[in-house]
């Protein structure tokens, strides 16, 4: 991409431009929060209505055989395609936290790797909380939290040194939630393997927008959420990926009936399923699960490589505009400049971050609304969702940021924050 | 109730008769499977549409503050009312299996009771599987499965003796899934307490139809599902109840961010919430959770005492008809005759159970469909949901059973069963 190209020309060349109409869009609003909750696909609304009325309302209990028993595997297969996993390697259901818990416990109990849990200071806090809980439960020493010098990027040498010193089970977010820093997945997987360690990759901020290839990167286990770039809806079920050769060696701590080899035999003893279904537990939340499927279908239709390419173009374009127009105004780019080290959100900070955020979301008069999100203490994140955002949206966003600071609009906004920012 | 009253008169006296119109009903079909999946409330369909379009589609991420953060507690409070718990004692979310897992682990880790898990042969198998998994994880001896002489009812003396011999943590289904046998809750809770033990009550087959009073019965902990008599939809989130004085002493093994005291501070260390929210883990499945609320609202509106009274009348009426008309034809009543020992489903068996079941669900010609469910090897269960079933529905069901056997309709049906029966 020529960085001096106009947003107009970039939009003209955008192969994915027509996908915007597949989503519910509001007038006079640019939604840059796809990295916390993706938009509603129009088709999802119809899909849910139909499921509720026909499958639940009319067909009732018969829908378990007709539709719902196969749903987790079918949706899992679609996610598998997105990350180049095999059909039987991905299972959808429950939350990312519960999936990380199950996977972490399974790895500790398997005794394949030393019982040392590790994570780093860039990981999303809930991953650290979950690991901490596992350590308490197995009475092993607390997780080691590898500290990097900044929120911006990981120091790979420090990571390697720690893996070398303390082999074990490491959990990392492929794309970090603050800066969108992206780890060198293959390099670290290979290094971990050499050092009798394994990495659990949390793909939450990456799946659906980064072209992940679990085979090429030698990834063995991963988890992730689906309500961001996969547009699965609020709290849509998460997923778990386990490489086929590893499935046999791992067992879920939560031995629910849906993980049984033959759940509807109602037998007295638990016999785990042979495949990844053994990580299922209770009855799946069918309506939330069905809502998710359409979002993934659109992603597959657009093609993850096309999406990932557009993501690269978008963040490159945005960063170039930030450097030209915003850094002189006191904004600091908090995301890596090199695309190979970056996911699909761009993070800024500013002395008046929170107040600037409020100006974007609640502008005075008829100015366009821009919805980013905010992470304490000072980060404004702009999620660049290639399926429904244009280069012009980015241009307008940068313009708004510029005028908010130039005109000191932020001085009229409060410093206090609500619960979710 | 005068047992000789006609179904017509009973329906005339039924205060809840108008609630049927609040549900989606199919013509020429009597749905007796509310004990596996309740019907769709009309209002739920509108509720979900509105949530999807307005809260997700239009309001997007802002709905977390505006609507969704409070949802689990609000719905939890409504369930609390149904079982006479306090507002802060019930939390909704995840599946029954995951909730039992969390509660079981929390109790084992608390060391308040001996680390001996127990259950009985009448409990739903997944509860046993979950306990078995917990035992493996904590390296304690396998759960003791107390065996009763029949599937029909528990032998209270055997239970007491076992509690006396092996104090610990016992899990029982208040209403058993096969026969609908109902335990004497208070008697057993008090006996457990005297013997340094605690009972985890699985309320799945009881909540929304049995008038449960956790206070009067001295119940300390319970779990339950909501897709049966609460009409929450397929895989609607389950719930967990913990008596206030016990909440402080228990901690969830799954330390997810929603169980944190201040999740949106994104702090490094896990500090559990003070209240029952500490048992939350990841992001709630909002669409499934919202679908559940309407079902509970209807139950609260009808009144659990009215529902429970009608349930008693219905099962008493059905059992009296079974004894008069069906036992001479080889049917065996597999539910307790005494209402105080019974939930709201009535179970029958017959030499040709499975084939009879198929005649009910797929009759020849224009005969009315009756949808019960089937539990191997020989049980046909009829779930009597007072909100949408009439005494006439029961009369017709018994008539159908009679003619199926008298006319040997079952001879045309196959013996093989699908996955979910």
Image: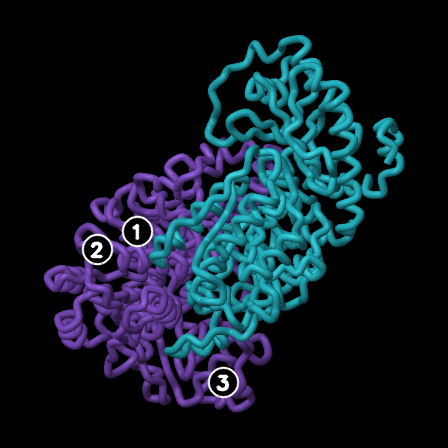
Chain colours: A purple, B cyan
> In this figure, which residue is indicated by the disc labeled 2?
A219
Residue A123 in sight in this render: yes
The tag on residue A355 is 3
Give the CA distance from mark 3 to mark 2: 41 Å
Helix, strand or loop under label 2: loop
Labels 3 and 2 within one chain: yes
Labels 1 and 2 within one chain: yes
Q: The N terminus of chain B appears in which quarter of the rendering?
A: top right
Q: Residue at x 69, y 44 (%)?
A: B42
Place of residue A346 in the rendered image (x, y in percent of width and height, measured from the top left)? 34, 72
Residue B182, quarter of picture: top right
User: What is the count of numbered marks?
Assistant: 3
* Residue B382 located left or right of residue A194: right
Labels 1 and 3 within one chain: yes
Question: Which numbered mark, 3 or 2, is in the foreground of this view?
Answer: 2
Place of residue A230 in the rendered image (x, y in percent of width and height, measured from the top left)? 40, 55
Position of residue B416 relative to residue A185, above or below, is above
Category of crowding for the residue at label 2, using alpha-carbon neighbours closer than 10 angstroms: few (below 14), some (14–19), many (at least 20): many
Give the CA distance from mark 1 to mark 3: 40 Å
* Residue B26 located left or right of residue A365: right
Category of crowding for the residue at label 3, using alpha-carbon neighbours closer than 10 angstroms: few (below 14), some (14–19), many (at least 20): many
């Amino acid at each position: 991409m020529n960085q001096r190209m106009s947003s107009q020309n970039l939009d003209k060349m955008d192969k994915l431009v027509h996908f915007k109409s597949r989503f519910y869009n509001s007038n006079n609003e640019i939604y840059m929060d796809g990295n916390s909750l993706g938009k509603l696909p129009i088709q999802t609304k119809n899909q849910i209505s139909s499921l509720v009325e026909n499958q639940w309302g009319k067909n009732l209990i018969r829908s378990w055989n007709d539709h719902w028993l196969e749903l987790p595997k079918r949706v899992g297969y679609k996610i598998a395609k997105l990350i180049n996993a095999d059909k039987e390697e991905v299972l959808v259901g429950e939350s990312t936290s519960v999936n990380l818990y199950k996977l972490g416990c399974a790895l500790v109990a398997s005794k394949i790797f030393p019982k040392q849990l590790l994570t780093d200071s860039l990981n999303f806090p809930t991953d650290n909380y979950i690991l901490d809980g596992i350590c308490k439960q197995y009475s092993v020493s607390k997780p080691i939290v590898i500290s990097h010098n900044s929120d911006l990027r990981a120091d790979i040498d420090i990571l390697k040194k720690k893996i070398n010193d303390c082999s074990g089970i490491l959990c990392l977010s492929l794309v970090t939630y603050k800066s969108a820093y992206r780890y060198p997945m293959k390099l670290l997987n290979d290094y971990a393997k050499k050092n009798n360690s394994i990495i659990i990759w949390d793909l939450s901020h990456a799946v659906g927008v980064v072209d992940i290839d679990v085979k090429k990167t030698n990834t063995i286990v991963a988890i992730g959420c689906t309500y961001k770039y996969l547009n699965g809806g609020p709290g849509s079920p998460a997923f778990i990926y386990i490489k086929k050769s590893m499935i046999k060696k791992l067992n879920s701590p939560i031995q629910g009936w849906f993980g049984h080899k033959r759940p509807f035999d109602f037998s007295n003893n638990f016999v785990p399923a042979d495949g990844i279904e053994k990580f299922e537990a209770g009855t799946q939340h069918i309506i939330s699960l069905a809502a998710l499927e359409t979002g993934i279908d659109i992603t597959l239709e657009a093609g993850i490589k096309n999406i990932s390419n557009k993501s690269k173009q978008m963040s490159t374009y945005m960063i170039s505009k930030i450097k030209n127009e915003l850094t002189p105004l006191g904004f600091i780019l908090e995301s890596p400049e090199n695309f190979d080290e970056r996911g699909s959100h761009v993070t800024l900070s500013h002395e008046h971050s929170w107040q600037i955020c409020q100006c974007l979301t609640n502008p005075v008069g008829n100015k366009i609304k821009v919805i980013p999100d905010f992470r304490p203490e000072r980060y404004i994140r702009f999620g660049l969702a290639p399926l429904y955002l244009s280069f012009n949206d980015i241009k307008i966003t940068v313009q708004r940021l510029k005028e908010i600071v130039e005109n000191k609009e932020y001085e009229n906004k409060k410093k206090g924050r609500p619960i979710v920012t």
